[in-house]
Amino acid sequence: MPPTSEPHPPGATLTWAGCWRGARAILPVLPPVFVFGIAFGIAARGVGLEGWVAALMSMAVFAGAAQFAVLDLWTSPVPWLPLLVATFAINARHILLGASLRALCQGLSPWKVYGAMTLLSDLNWAALIAAERKGERDLGYLVGGGLLMWATWVSATVIGAVAGGLTLDDVKTYALDLVLVAFFATTLVGLRRGRVDDLPWLVAGLAAMGAVWFLPPNWHVMVGGLAGGVAGLIRDELKRP
């Protein structure tokens, strides 16, 4: 993606330098992404998907949690409606992630913004948010990290699909599906700004747990995110003079 050249408000940039900074920043998270990708490739073969189909899914979808959810539902014939509902419920959090980056997108051309958002994931979003607090204002930071993660995810899927030999239950038995969950938890701790975050996080966690118990599978992600966002909004409004 080329550097931006058209006029834009201060702070709204997308440059090669930003891409390079984002790629370097994401390097420490690539090992768990690689392991998770191998686990997906193995699990995909375990439910009967051809290796090239698993690789194509990782190239086009680039959403680990949603891809694993698809494997849970993959039968013959494919239940398209439950599959679409499940993937929407899991990936709806990207609406919130994208909204949080609005200030970094203002003034950029639509193709740059939408192109960058195709590479949006939890990890490069978290890296950009942490960098933004230190003064980073380049959307290329998201793009560089996303491209490196995408390449790692796809290549790991191919390796896992070629290896094969395990089922989805085996992946869960060896806790390979928990690799990124553990990493997300440690990333979240690093993003905590102090007591100001405690209430929204608590509300989000409780809402997600309630959704796991009382709602259909996979809706807990969106419910937790929305509940935490509303709690944060109410907190900020109550603090206004």
Image (cartoon, grey):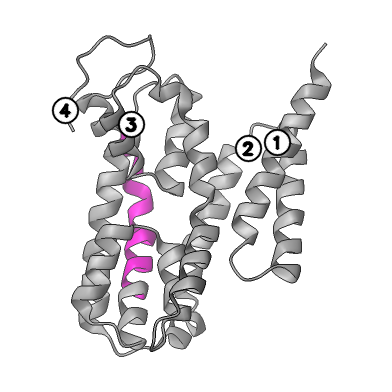
Q: Amino acid at mark 3?
A: Val
Q: Earlier along the polypeptide chain: callout 2 or callout 4?
A: 4
Percent x, y for residue 144? 27, 38
Q: Give the residue number, with chain letter if any, for mark 4.
A: 2
Percent x, y for residue 127? 43, 38
Q: Give the residue number, with chain letter if any, for mark 2.
A: 192
Q: Give the residue number, with chain letter if any, for mark 1.
A: 197
Residue nearer the viewer, 191 or 205: 205
Q: CA distance from mark 4 to mark 3?
A: 12 Å
Residue nearer the viewer, 121 or 111: 111
Q: Earlier along the polypeptide chain: callout 1 or callout 2?
A: 2
Marks 4,3: beta carbons within 8 A: no
Q: Give the residue number, with chain letter if any, for mark 3.
A: 113
Q: Nearer the viewer, mark 2 or mark 4?
A: 4
Q: Nearer the viewer, mark 3 or mark 1?
A: 3
Q: Amino acid at mark 2?
A: Arg
Local SS, label 3: helix
